[in-house]
Amino acid sequence: MSNILKQQPRCGQKLSGTYLATFLLTILCGASIAQGSQANLPSSPSELDRQFALKVFPLLKEKCFACHGDDAEKIKSELNLTTREGMLKGGEYSTEVLVPGDTDKSDLYHSVTWKKPDLEMPPKENDRLTEDQITLLSDWINTGAEWPDETIQKAIREEQWTAPANEDGILVKTSGGQADTWTYRRYQPEDIWAYQPVIKPELPITDQTDKHPVDAFIDSKRNSKGFGKAPEAADRILIRRIYFDLIGLPPTPTEFKHWSSRFNDSSDKAIETGALVDELMASTHYGERWAQHWLDVTRYADTGGCLMTTNVRMRGGIGIMSFDHSTKTSLTISSL
Ligand code: HEC
C-alpha cells in the first residue's frame, strides 16, 4: 500500500448515508413546478402598456441606460433615456430624440438604425439592435410612446413572471436567485423533464408488446422515424455493454468466461441478463461509477484534496466517492 493510502485523513473520509441522501435530494428535488400566483394589477393594463413593460423598457435598459441615465455622473450627451420626460427633453444636440407618433422625426429611432452619420447607437458594433428590436422601438414611437407609471409596469412584470406557463416557457419554483432574472427564469418543459410530475402514459401498440413495456416505447418511436430494428446483440457484445453501462469498465477474462457460459447454458437469456445486471448493481463499482457521474455533473474538482494537506494530493484532480451499495450506509472517498 502506498504511503498516501496509509495516511490518516484529517477530514472525514466517511460521510454518512444521510449526507448522500441530502446531496442527491438537493439535486433531484431542489426544484418543483411553481404554483402560479396572480399578481394584483391596479387596473387592466392595455396591450401597449404590456408591450412597454415587458419588451421596450427591458430593451432600453439593456442597451442604453448604462450611458444614458443609470449613472447621473457619467451621463452621455446630457441625454437621460430612463424616463419619458428625459427623452422628450432631448440631449446636448437634439431636441427631437422622441417625437411621440412620429418615428421619422425621432432621433431615438434614427440612432439605432445607424443610418444617420455621427449618430450610431449603441456605439459598439457588437451591441447593435436586431431588426426585430428596431421594429419594436419604431412601433412603440408610432403608437404614441406609451410609458405606464412604475407601479403598473411592476405589476405587469410580476404577473408575467409568476405565470406558471407562458410563451417563454414554464416557471420552476426555487429558493430564489440573486436577481429576478434568475428567480423567474423560464425553461422549456422538455429541458427539465426530470422535475415534471410522474405520469403513467398509455402503452403504444407495437409488435413488441409481449416484451418489456419500455420496448414498446422505443419501438413506436423508432417506427415513427422509419428505422428498422437493430439485430439482437451477440452474448459477447451484450455482456461487455452491460459492464460498460453499469460500472464503466469491461469484464475481466474470468468474468467474461463465467457469464458467457451461463448465457450459453440458460434456456432463458433474459434471466441471465437480469442476474448479471443485479450483480453489477450490487457491486461497489456501480456506486463509484455513479458517484463519478454526479461529481462531473456538479463540476467537482479537487486539486489539494479534501484532506487539505500539502503532501496528500489527489491524483487526477478528482476524488471518487464510492457509495457502498451493499450496506447503503457509508460513502467513502478514495484517491484515484
Ligand atoms: C457606451 C455608451 C452609450 C450607449 C450604450 C448608448 N449611447 Fe447614445 N450616446 C453616447 C454618446 C457618447 C453620445 C454623444 C454623441 C456621440 O459621441 O456619438 C450619445 C448620444 C446619443 C444621442 C444624441 C443625443 C443628443 O442630443 O446629444 C441619442 C439620441 C442616443 N445617444 C441614443 C441612444 C440610444 C437609443 C441608445 C440605446 C439603444 C444609446 N444611445 C446607447 C453613448 C452611448
Image (tube, helix red, strand yellow):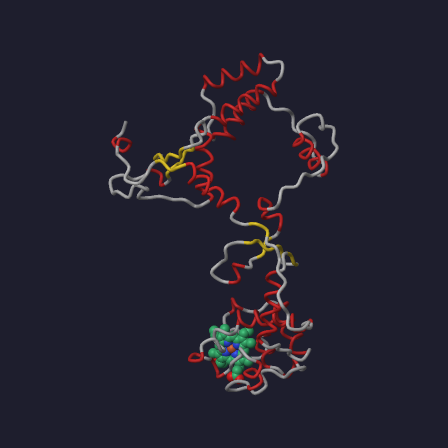
Instruction: Name which quarter of the figure residue 6 lies in.
Output: top left
Q: Nearer the viewer, residue 269 or 93?
A: 269
Looking at the image, residue 67 lies above or below residue 279? below
Residue 118 in view here = no
Across and down, in percent, residue 227 comes to 69, 34
Looking at the image, residue 157 lies above or below residue 220? below
Instruction: Identify the residue shown where x is 59% and y is 19%.
Output: 271
Across and down, in percent, residue 267 comes to 62, 13
Q: Nearer the viewer, residue 141 or 291?
A: 291
Q: Is residue 31 left or right of residue 322?
A: right
Across and down, in percent, residue 263 comes to 57, 16
Looking at the image, residue 212 lies above or below residue 202? above
Q: Is residue 251 left or right of residue 230?
A: left
Instruction: Identify the residue shown where x is 42% and y is 30%.
Output: 324
State which quarter of the image contains the C terminus: top left
Residue 317 in view here = yes
- Name the residue furthest top: 265
Instruction: Identify the residue shown where x is 37% and y is 34%.
Output: 332
Instruction: Name which quarter of the figure residue 239 lies in.
Output: top right
State which quarter of the image contains the N terminus: top left
Across and down, in percent, residue 51 comes to 65, 70
Figure disc tally? 0
